[in-house]
Image (cartoon, helix red, strand yellow):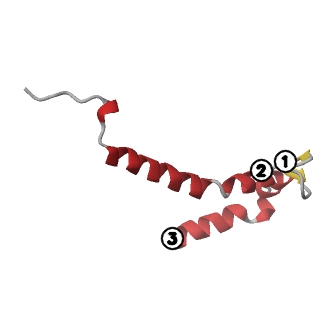
Amino acid sequence: MGEVRSQHDAPEGVWLGRLVIAGIVVLVLLPVLPLALYSFAGRWLYPDILPSDWSLRAWEYIARERSGVLEATLTSLGIA
């Protein structure tokens, strides 16, 4: 009969692969974090770690019809 292996008995190569994938995900997503924070920042001066004021001004602007964001997005999707 075949031996049943648990998840803890995975070969070392599997763990190394998972570690590499986790590292790549962190390297890709880490630069997006300041951009996401900045989209809600009303005022963010150096050397502050976080914004001193929070605002939805940028999101309110892109939600307006005259901003052209929806049209630009649809054009980009059409080209792609």
Residue under label 3, please give it.
80
Residue 68's place in the image compared with 41, above or below, is: below
Residue under label 2, please give it.
37
Question: From the viewer's perspective, is 33 left or right of 2?
Answer: right
Q: Nearer the viewer, mark 1 or mark 2?
A: 1
Report how far apart the C-alphas of labels 3 and 2 lie in the structure: 28 Å
Secondary structure of the residue carrying numbered label 3 = loop
Q: Amino acid at mark 2?
A: Leu
Residue 15 coordinates in the image, percent (x, y): 38, 44
Residue 75 coordinates in the image, percent (x, y): 60, 70
Q: Amino acid at mark 3?
A: Ala
Give the residue drawn at x 58%, y 57%: 27
Q: Are marks 1 and 3 in contact (CB under 8 Å)?
A: no
Report how far apart the C-alphas of labels 1 and 2 lie in the structure: 8 Å
Secondary structure of the residue carrying numbered label 2 = helix
Give the residue drawn at x 11%, y 29%: 2
Q: Nearer the viewer, mark 1 or mark 3?
A: 1
Residue 10 coordinates in the image, percent (x, y): 30, 38
Q: Nearer the viewer, mark 3 or mark 2?
A: 2
Report how far apart the C-alphas of labels 1 and 3 lie in the structure: 36 Å
Give the residue drawn at x 89%, y 56%: 47
| Disc number for residue 50 | 1
Displayed quadrant of residue 69: bottom right
Q: Residues within 10 Å of mark 2 (few under 14, many from 20)?
A: few
Give the residue drawn at x 55%, y 66%: 77
Task: Indicate which disc, 1 or 2, sits on the residue closer to the N terminus.
Answer: 2
Q: Are marks 1 and 2 in contact (CB under 8 Å)?
A: yes
Residue 9 coordinates in the image, percent (x, y): 30, 33
Question: From the viewer's perspective, is 14 left or right of 44?
Answer: left
